[in-house]
Amino acid sequence: MRTVTVRELRGHGGAVLDDVARGKSVVVTRDGTPVAELRPVPRRGATAADLVARRRHLPDVDPAALRADVDAVLDMTL
């Protein structure tokens, strides 16, 4: 885990936050004593396990019926 001083944070805050955005945690120290920890906010997106679980509950798709539906809607002469 990276450690930065308050002074470094003030002077290079953008770079420190770039590291945090890339998934790194940073401890901020004042006079050598840790006072804060900056860490990435948990992502709201679905994990791979969530996507697999969702896929299991989807209805089966008949490819021929899907193609017929698409052909009925789209004008293939365009």
Image (tube, rainbow, N blue to C red):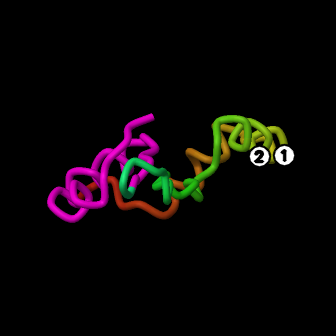
Q: Is residue 3 above or below residue 10?
A: above
Taking the spot 80% from the left edge, 40% from the top edge, the residue there is 53
Numbered marks: total: 2
Q: Residue tagged by mark 2?
A: 54
> Mark 1 belongs to which amino acid?
His
Q: Secondary structure at mark 1?
A: loop
Q: Is residue 74 above or below residue 23?
A: below
Q: Residue farthest to the left?
A: 11
Q: Is residue 63 above or below residue 4?
A: above
Which segment is the magenta one?
1-29
Q: Residue 26: within the magenta?
A: yes
Taking the spot 30% from the left edge, 60% from the top edge, the residue there is 6
Q: Residue 38: within the magenta?
A: no
Q: Residues within 10 Å of mark 1 (few under 14, many from 20)?
A: few
Q: Nearer the viewer, residue 52 or 76?
A: 52
Whether tag 2 and tag 1 are in contact, CB under 8 A, the answer is yes
Q: Secondary structure at mark 2?
A: helix
Q: From the top left corner, tell me how far across and down residue 61 is, in percent.
A: 72, 42
Q: Residue tagged by mark 1?
A: 57
- In the rendered image, the quadrant that contains the N terminus is top left
- In the rendered image, the quadrant that contains the C terminus is bottom left
Q: From the top left corner, tell me how far across and down residue 14 is, in percent.
A: 21, 59
Taking the spot 26% from the left edge, 58% from the top edge, the residue there is 9
> Mark 2 belongs to which amino acid?
Arg
Could you tell whether 45 is left or right of 36 in the image? Answer: right
Could you tell whether 53 is left or right of 66 in the image? Answer: right
Disc assigned to residue 29: none
Q: Nearer the viewer, residue 41 or 12?
A: 12
Q: Is residue 71 visible?
A: no
Q: Is residue 13 visible?
A: yes
